[in-house]
């Protein structure tokens, strides 16, 4: 028998704060990130155990006992092919970057995203050392699991691009790409290959794993905003509440966040906390007054610094990422 709305709200009210929800499905075409949503306040840095996970077949068996035998090869249209083992990767100069990663399959208001401090080697320095040919136009990143995707060669020199081997100060967990994963701010996670074993410089990049299944080739992050508290259907027992949530626009930054509590007749600017980096999400808050008891429809929207306000019309994640306003209803007693 289908669960009613009132039964659902009672069930949710009984779940302990911080308890992880079962994985939820996002997107189509077999993309199903494991999402770990908690009722705790969203933190600037996402704990590793709460960071979403997406892959095509799970961690490669060849890496479950460690990096022995693993090598990173940089080859293709280059004058100086490179092969590095794990020790040589760790011996190279490293950088730290705080970067938010978002799954292209994340729906409106979804939780398939997280922010971490990543440490690794600057991608641009490695590619520069390999001396790509003049006519090389792209880089194909190949994972130990058989996954592959490509980015334009010029994006390897993005100031935030790196090959990460640490996450939140600890060795990169296996499910997040150990021993090495790609991070290039501005792209959805579809472009950020895990378990990277080969980087091939090519003239024309072939379709990646998900592109062959209809997903976007560009895969650029769209402006996104979400209400984290209160949750949809929540009962509020005061005539004001401190709403909170997150907004994100890849490497374009958030210019402003607006909140509506009257069915989108009017919008008011929310307060923004300074992001931890230019590549990280922005946490917002808004003190909302409710003049009387009743059901209120809350909504949030954001704008980045360059391309403007997020799209309001709803669009499914497939094939280029979701767009639309996150809306919820709350009951004020």
Image (tube, rainbow, N blue to C red):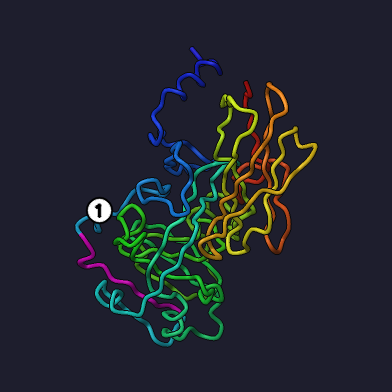
In screen coordinates, is 305 left or right of 150? right
- As rendered, which of 92 and 238 lies closer to the eye? 238
Q: Is residue 53 visible?
A: no
Residue identifier under label 1: 61
The residue stretch that appears in magenta: 66-76
Name which residue lies at 48% across and 83% down: 132
Q: Residue furthest right?
A: 265
Q: Quadrant of residue 66?
A: bottom left
Residue 176 image position (x, y, % from top left): 36, 55
Q: Is residue 68 magenta?
A: yes
Name which residue lies at 34% across and 64% down: 166
Q: How many marks?
A: 1
From this view, report whether residue 189 is shown above or below residue 235. below
Name which residue lies at 43% across and 65% down: 182
- As rendered, which of 286 and 11 lies closer to the eye? 286
Residue 72 image position (x, y, % from top left): 33, 72
């Amino acid at each position: 028998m289908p669960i009613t709305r009132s039964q659902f709200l009672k069930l949710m009210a009984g779940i302990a704060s911080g308890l992880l929800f079962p994985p939820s499905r996002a997107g189509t075409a077999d993309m199903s990130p494991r999402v770990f949503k908690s009722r705790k306040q969203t933190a600037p840095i996402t704990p590793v155990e709460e960071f979403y996970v997406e892959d095509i077949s799970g961690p490669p068996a060849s890496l479950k006992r460690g990096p022995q035998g693993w090598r990173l090869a940089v080859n293709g249209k280059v004058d100086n092919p490179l092969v590095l083992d794990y020790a040589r990767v760790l011996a190279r100069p490293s950088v730290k970057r705080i970067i938010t990663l978002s799954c292209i399959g994340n729906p409106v208001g979804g939780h398939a995203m997280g922010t971490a401090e990543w440490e690794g080697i600057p991608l641009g320095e490695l590619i520069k050392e390999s001396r790509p040919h003049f006519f090389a136009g792209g880089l194909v990143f190949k994972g130990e699991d058989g996954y592959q995707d490509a980015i334009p060669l010029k994006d390897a020199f993005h100031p935030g691009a790196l090959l990460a081997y640490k996450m939140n100060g600890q060795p990169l967990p296996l499910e997040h790409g150990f021993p090495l994963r790609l991070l290039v701010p501005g792209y959805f996670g579809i472009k950020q290959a895990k378990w990277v074993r080969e980087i091939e410089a090519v003239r024309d990049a072939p379709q990646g794993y998900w592109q062959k299944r209809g997903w976007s080739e560009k895969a650029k992050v769209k402006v996104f905003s979400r209400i984290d508290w209160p949750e949809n259907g929540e009962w509020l027992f005061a005539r004001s509440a401190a709403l909170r949530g997150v907004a994100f626009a890849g490497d374009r930054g958030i210019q402003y966040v607006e909140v509506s509590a009257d069915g989108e007749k009017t919008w008011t600017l929310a307060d923004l906390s300074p992001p931890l980096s230019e590549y990280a999400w922005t946490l917002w808050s808004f003190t909302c007054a409710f003049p009387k008891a009743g059901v209120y429809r809350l909504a949030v929207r954001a704008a980045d610094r360059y391309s403007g306000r997020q799209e309001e019309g709803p669009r499914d994640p497939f094939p280029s990422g979701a767009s639309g306003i996150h809306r919820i209803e709350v009951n004020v007693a």
